[in-house]
Amino acid sequence: MKVLHVIPSLDRQDGGPTAAMTDIATALEAAGVSVSVATTVSRTEGATLPVNWPASVPVMSFGRWLSSYKIAPRLAVWLWNNAKCFDVIHIHACFSFSSTATAFVARLRGVPYVVRPLGTLAPYGLSQRRRVLKTASYALIEGPYVRAASAVHCTSAQECRDLRAIQPRAAGVEIPLAVQPAKFSPRGALVSAFPQLASRRVILFLSRIDPKKNLEALLDAFIAIAPSFDDATLVIAGDGDTLYVDRLKRRSMGLGARIVWVGHVSGEVKSSLLSHAYCFVLPSFTENFGIAAAEALSYGLPVVLADGVAISSEVSEHRAGLVTGTDAVSVAEALTLLLTDGALRDQLSVSAAKLAEARFGSTRLGRELVSLYLRLKQQS
């Protein structure tokens, strides 16, 4: 079976979508599917694949004209000439040229296609950033091709509910994303990379830095509890818009070395942080899945998630972490409980690893996607 995946970008700064696409490609390759990926890249910077991208999965990169909508005319031409070579086309994201062009070509060429919205159809996603333009665009462009899709890939029950609310006739299918097995690093690797974290209890945020992630609440929560826990350090791992990051740093500058900004991390540095952090925090207003949280769970890290993170309900059900509101007070209360009750933290840690293995395994993702693709191929 030959499947084409089309995603607007595989840039590092896009965070979760890039990580998810990497895991999907890896899972499908292991399941015996012939996978190809088409994406757009900056015409000046060119293409740089994620460090753990599966070497046997080809990526076709097309120069884009705009960073926002990512217009890439050569992609549309390539799609028209090659769409019929694939049994199924899997589209990632909405409100992007690559998604619109792919859906249009797939319908004309008679190729079944799947849309993974990446949270863009959630109430938060539709209300933020150019709300009026998005509303009009959805009515004229995204809505029709989502409704006509052979399937809409939702990564959580919450995303399925959001889809039904806005598009009741869409063929939603829930298939959770996967994370790769944890690669534990010795504590020496952490201390070597970050000497200031030796003998510290690390509260870890590891994700793309964006207003959606609600880092303001986390910073205010840590500022409130820091005087009570002298051995705790907040580590912010990730990058984002420079002006926004600088604004966040000014918000917390009173704590000095108690908050460590490490920027984007990968490889052994990333695994060392995940291996030895005390807990992981993601207070996002909304996440259609929460790939960073799922990765933390695979390392046995208790997680503190805002209730807008889609997998928070599963975390709560399986007692793999604590679920809070998006306000600083409730985040502070959860952190205080974990830092005070070591036995609770250890219990949550065991449950976290079990949940990740049972729910977010790569084999399960590959199997469920293959089943979906075979069904769509037979129906076409």
Image: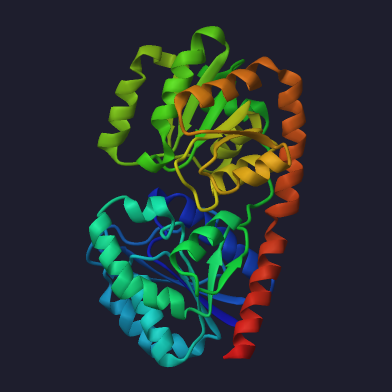
User: How is the structure coloured here?
Assistant: rainbow
Between 82 and 280, the one nearer to me in the picture: 280
Image height check: is 76 above or below 209? Answer: below
Q: Residue at x 51, y 17 (%)?
A: 196
The quadrant where residue 171 appears? bottom right
How many labels were placed on the picture? Answer: 0
For residue 8, side relative to residue 342 (left or right): left
Q: Residue at x 45, y 59 (%)?
A: 49
Between 59 and 259, the one nearer to me in the picture: 259
Quarter of the image that includes the N terminus: bottom right
Quarter of the image that includes the C terminus: bottom right
The quadrant where residue 137 appears? bottom left
Q: Residue at x 52, y 26 (%)?
A: 331
Q: Position of residue 355 (x, y in %)?
A: 73, 46
For residue 44, side relative to residue 288 (left or right): left
Q: Position of residue 99 (x, y in %)?
A: 38, 72
For residue 72, side relative to residue 225 (left or right): left
The quadrant where residue 349 appears? top right
- Residue 210 in view here: no
Image height check: is 16 above or below 273? Answer: below
- Residue 140 in view here: yes
Q: Position of residue 30 (x, y in %)?
A: 68, 68
Between 271 and 317, the one nearer to me in the picture: 317
Q: Position of residue 89 (x, y in %)?
A: 50, 79
